[in-house]
Image (cartoon, grey):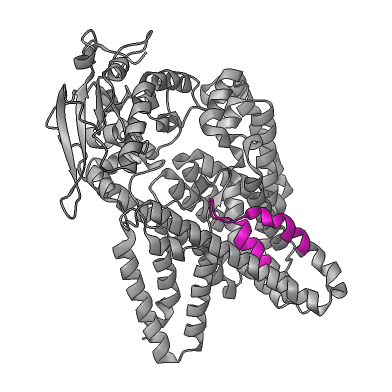
Amino acid sequence: MVVLRRLAPGCLALALILYVKPYTGIRHDSTLYLVQALHVLSPVIFGRDLFFLAGSQADFTIFPQLVALVLKAVEPGPAFLVLSLLGRIAFYAASAYLVVGLFPTRWRWPAIFALVIMPTGYGAFSIFSYAEPFFTARPASEALSLFALGLLVRNRTWTSILVFALAGALHPLQGLAAVIVGWCWLVQGDRRWLWSLWLTVPITLLAWLKVGPLEGLFRSIDTEWREMIIGLSDQVYLGKWTPRDWCIVLTDVYLLTLLAVQGSTGGKAARLAKATLWAVAVGLACSAILSDLLQLVLPTGLQLWRVLWVAHWLAVASAPLLIWESWKDPRRGTIPALLLLSIALIGTSIPHSTLPWAVLGLIPLHIAWAYLAGKVSGGVRKLLVVGVVAAMLIAVIRYELKALDVFAMLEHNLELMRLDVVMLSYPLVLAILVVAATFSFRHANRLGQTLLGALSLIAVAGSVTAWDSRSPWTQVQESATGANVFGYDVPENATVFWYASEASPLGPWLVLRRANYFSPFQLSGQMFNRDTPFIGRELQIQIDPVMIQAEICDFVTRSDSRAVPCRVSKPGLESLCTGHGGLQPPDYFVLPFDQREHVRGQWKVRHPGTGEVLLTQYLYKCNDWSPGLKEADSTGRG
């Protein structure tokens, strides 16, 4: 019984960690880490892929080699599911280790729960977040970085440096961001660490000698290359960020500033806040000058603004302490605490739902309140309280209504959207539930606490069971990896164009285990290699006639289920399969349309639970549509 009572907070946190962000399969950047590992295992097959033709970001990390070792024994579907779960647990375990080193005992659990329930996004366009719910190198590198910071605040400096090095080996960008924070911490404690800046001398010399990727330190991105980067990856340039993005940055900086001035109350947390603020200044300044202004290749690729992930982590973790300290301050009253709560909830925004620019009014009001409090009447105070509470409730309602709209667009299909997760995931809703559970536990007798502890264990079991929330199509794709689903052997040296309504290269990479002809995903490393976007542009032109017609067919089919079966025109397919200039077309292509001729194979995709046919995919060979086309074993990519 004692064990159950002690386990209750940890079990509740673990249940929320798994419940709030369920696993949805190999998607987003997870697909890139999959193909990097497959390239290690089958370099001949995947060396033809655009992602590797001009070199890739995989050249700067050991992560693909580690994943490849796993894939030798386990198929990607179950491997990525388990590794994603382990990465999530490792991240929050490392977070807890750092939290224990930073905060007083009574604020450790609130900090951990805040990290679980608050939004994790940072940077531009709601693209980036820490503790991602899919498998990449980032959560692993972030976990090691947090662990290294935890060692650093415990004065285990040299051990932390070794862990930082390992974090950088897994994901250089996330690891480097944390290193900048760690360096600022060390300089605060001992100015002699400034001597480490002499390391820039040999780095500059190697860059001048054009050694490896360091030569990019003096090489500029030309205008045409920059325009292509902006077309797909404009988030790397601070000048392209929106006011909304900067409001989130402002919120984090403001919370860290409040933490930094906590003095003796903040302790090590206050010192780390100061270090993080300096790191944010360094990271943003270097990005603005070296990347946006000077257009240098290496600084653009390093994306030093990623220090914001550590800033966001610390701002979120410190929010409960800051709000409570403000609440109990008799000189200021409850209004500053409510303002701070609304700043944290609205400013650390959920993508495409809340209105973070409201902090442009809330933060100045919170700053000015110390000077206004004595001049504000009781009626105005009540009105202000009602206004702040209304703003938070409006944000909740706006979020929930948007969630219901999306669910309706998906035809209320729970297999495509976990409505329960989305509706409960809003930070204010989860915070109320956690506070209610904590209040009930603290005011219950021993039997009640034991029952609540047992319920928390049941919650963990339930969240583990429901954690795998892959859609039927994703489950089918991941279970069919390497299988001959079309009943036709596609040569190993072939490139395959696979049309999908949701752009993804998983068809060729995961199902067929072949090189993909073109997908926007393959351009993710375009700021590292100049040739990649230029080859990609030509390949995009090659597939455009088919893409446009296929997208129209998809739209018609979704709009009217009674519509006549749609197909791509024969001239469109002949264009796809005809070489233009020095560019070779794909060897094979896959469409969800029966073209009624030259079908090499078909795959009826069935629901893994009901057996119902979800869709049918058709395999075609390009030289059936363009007789003059060379065979796959003699073609190049141009």
Task: Looking at this view, name the residue that lies furthest to the right.
Answer: 375
Q: Which residues are magenta?
A: 340-365
- Considering the whole magenta stretch, tell me its main secondary structure: helix
Foreground residue among 300 and 576? 576
Residue positioned 44% across, 69% down in the render: 13
Q: Position of residue 82 (x, y in %)?
A: 31, 53
Whether residue 115 appears in this view of the structure is yes
Residue 576: image quadrant is top left
Q: Position of residue 380 (x, y in %)?
A: 79, 74
Whether residue 75 appears in this view of the structure is no
- The answer to whether 202 appears left or right of 481 in the picture is right
Residue positioned 52% across, 59% down in the render: 399
Residue positioned 40% across, 59% down in the render: 89
Task: Looking at this view, name the residue that lies furthest to the left.
Answer: 487
Residue 536: image quadrant is top left
- The answer to whether 145 appears left or right of 1 in the picture is right
* In the rendered image, the vertical position of residue 77 relative to residue 636, given as above or below: below
Q: Position of residue 252 (x, y in %)?
A: 65, 55
* In the rendered image, the vertical position of residue 488 relative to residue 624, given as above or below: below
Q: Quadrant of the C terminus?
A: top left
- The answer to whether 391 appears left or right of 616 in the picture is right
Q: Quadrant of the N terminus?
A: bottom left
Foreground residue among 308 and 418? 418
Q: Is residue 352 magenta?
A: yes
Q: Position of residue 63 (x, y in %)?
A: 39, 40
Residue positioned 19% across, 36% down in the render: 482
Q: Is residue 618 magenta?
A: no
* In the rendered image, the vertical position of residue 545 relative to residue 183, given as above or below: above
Q: How many marks?
A: 0
Foreground residue among 209 and 349? 349
